[in-house]
Image: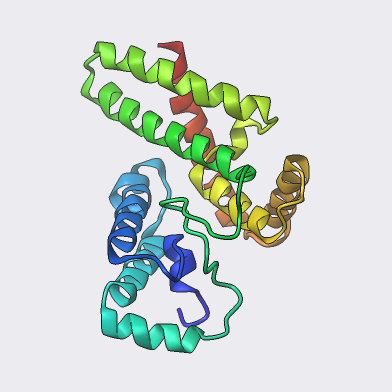
Amino acid sequence: MESINYYEILGVSQKASQDEIVAAKNLLAKQYHPDVNMKNGIDTTEQMQQILEAYRILSNPEKRAEYDRKLSGNKAVMHNFTLYNMEETEVTGDYGFVVYWKAAGALYDIVLQSDDIFKSRERTSRLAQLSMQALKYIVQLREASIPEKYWHPDIMNWLLFTWYKNRNVTIAYLLTLYDEHLKNDVSPLDRLKRQKEALHYQHSLKRLVKY
């Protein structure tokens, strides 16, 4: 894993606090835990191992300091940007694609809550509340001309990192870049897994909205 940046794995800034690192690890572990994904035929063991390895290093002050020394001068780390608390020193005013990334993230959390309720077979009023909350973010993403197939957190994270490198690109071009990345850089097996994840998420989202 030496070629993989631990900060990028957790989606945090190199200046992230310990609390931010813990929060990032917990959020990603919830998404990538093999027990959660295996029932959908998706093996996320490797991703989970990477998350835990990154957390093992970055949660230890001494190991993190040693790791940071190795990263010295590495331009790949987004020093002033963190996905989890949205604190940013370089970007002011309109956050651009960050707005839609946050909307997609909030929508994903809502869908996860609804999935738990549907599994319990208890059709409570909470589902109606979640459906109303989801509609707000759905409208926001659709108005930005971002199709549903891109709303999964893994895809939105990739789009956000790509946007960060060049904040002048249009959303349409961002989506084209992702499609090219999926076609040229991702193996057929991983591509199929990603498509299954996206379709499963879309199904859960439609079930909630129809409630």
Q: Is residue 191 above or below residue 145?
A: below
Q: Is residue 73 above or below residue 32?
A: below
**Residue drawn at x 72%, y 58% as measured from the top left:** 166
**Residue drawn at x 46%, y 12% as measured from the top left:** 210
Q: Nearer the viewer, residue 96 or 147?
A: 96
Q: Position of residue 157 (x, y in %)?
A: 54, 51
**Residue drawn at x 67%, y 53% as measured from the top left:** 163
In which quadrant of the rendered view does residue 118 lie?
top left
Q: How many marks?
A: 0
Q: Please identify the quadrant where the N terminus is shown.
A: bottom left
Q: Nearer the viewer, residue 196 or 32?
A: 32
In which quadrant of the rendered view does residue 95 lie?
top right
Q: Nearer the viewer, residue 195 or 156?
A: 156
Q: Position of residue 195 (x, y in %)?
A: 57, 42
Give the side of residue 194 with respect to residue 84, left or right: right
**Residue drawn at x 45%, y 31% as measured from the top left:** 107
Q: Is residue 104 above or below residue 27?
A: above
Give the side of residue 115 with respect to residue 144, left or right: left
Q: Is residue 148 above or below residue 187?
A: above
Q: Position of residue 182 (x, y in %)?
A: 67, 53
Give the side of residue 154 with respect to residue 22, left or right: right
Give the side of residue 149 with respect to residue 127, left or right: right
Q: Please identify the quadrant where the C terminus is shown.
A: top left
Q: Nearer the viewer, residue 79 or 150?
A: 79
